[in-house]
Amino acid sequence: MTALIYLTGIAVFALVIYLTLELAPAAPTGKLSEILTPADGVILTGWRKSLSPLDKPVSKWIPADFLRKTRSDLYWAHMGDRWMDWNEVQFTSLRIALAVAGFGLGMVTTAEPVFALVGGLIGFQYPAMSMGGVARRYRRRFIAQLPEYVQLVSAQMSANISMEEALRRTAAPFHSVQGKSESQSLVGKWISWVLQMAQGRDLIEQMQREAQESQLPELIGMSVQLEFIRRGTAQQELMGQLATSIAADYIGSAEQRAEKVGSELVIPMVVFYFLPFLVTIMAVIGWPIVQNLGAM
């Protein structure tokens, strides 16, 4: 056990030195450039550069479903300008490195494998919890703003404007009546992103690709419906029906979430309210009875 503690301490020390010191040249060459320079030609820096030796093993051995879920969360974290330039492989490498560091720290400080495993689990889960909370918040904001945005596009098309032009106009930031600029809606920001990616490409096809990357069912369904609307003849009426359908789906899902929250609150209410109340009543009523029985 003592030897294991020493080896763990040495491994943690080596990991800290590797992550904090600049051991690679600024312009990598040879085999090192294959690791530190991705396919798009951008040279990695910071944590991504330090953890890059883990990227190839992670991409090879980590299950595809796990990486796909991480890519979806990172997609929405990027919408909130968080974890920019990180991909799913690099983020998973960070989680593995923090898990090893947490395990080593637990072994060095407590010398107990159980506490070391807890430290490793915390190190592995904390980045996912932090990034996943941001992604979940922006998903909900996007879904909440989607019905209003589609209705705005439908209103633009009612003025004899093409669907592509209506999407471009509604992607611009909104302005208040007083002339003060308001923040751009999250859906408008996403459409602006799609417009930038669709330079020289078909807009709806690019929207479908981005929707698949987001793995958001509401967005995938909308992109598919927009393709049918573009091919149809009564585009204004179809867009109005799509706006009504998305709004109805959002209201239905909100009601389901409200019912689910009510049922989920039953157990916390029992644990934090009913059980203390029951214990208090039993202590007030039952303690005198126990004392009387003891006196007999």
Image (tube, grey):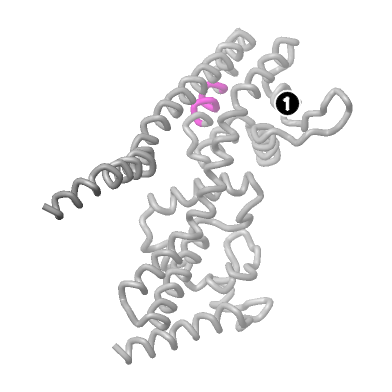
Q: Residue 38: horizontal and vertical position, in percent?
A: 58, 64
Above or below 207: residue 45: below
The magenta stretch spans residue 2: no
Q: Amino acid at mark 1?
A: Thr
* Principal secondary structure, stretch drawn in magenta: helix
Work out which residue is located at the far left of the displayed protein and give it: 296
Q: Nearer the viewer, residue 161 or 185?
A: 185
- Residue at image coords 66%, 41%: 197
Work out which residue is located at the far right of the displayed protein and give it: 179
Q: Is residue 260 left or right of residue 160?
A: left
Q: Residue 26: horizontal and vertical position, in percent?
A: 68, 77
- Residue at image coords 58%, 58%: 86
Above or below 34: residue 284: above
* Residue 295 visible in image: yes
Give, as a single range, the part of the protein colored magenta.
Answer: 220-226
Above or below 185: residue 148: above
Q: Nearer the viewer, residue 169 or 76?
A: 76
Residue to which mark 1 is pinned:
170
Assign the N terminus to one quadrant of the image. bottom left
Disc 1: CA contacts within 10 A as few (<14), some (14-19) or many (>=20): many
Q: Give the secondary structure at mark 1.
A: helix
Q: Nearer the viewer, residue 288 or 244?
A: 288
**Quadrant of residue 284 within the rendered picture:** top left
Q: Residue 283: horizontal and vertical position, in percent?
A: 28, 47
Above or below 238: residue 185: below
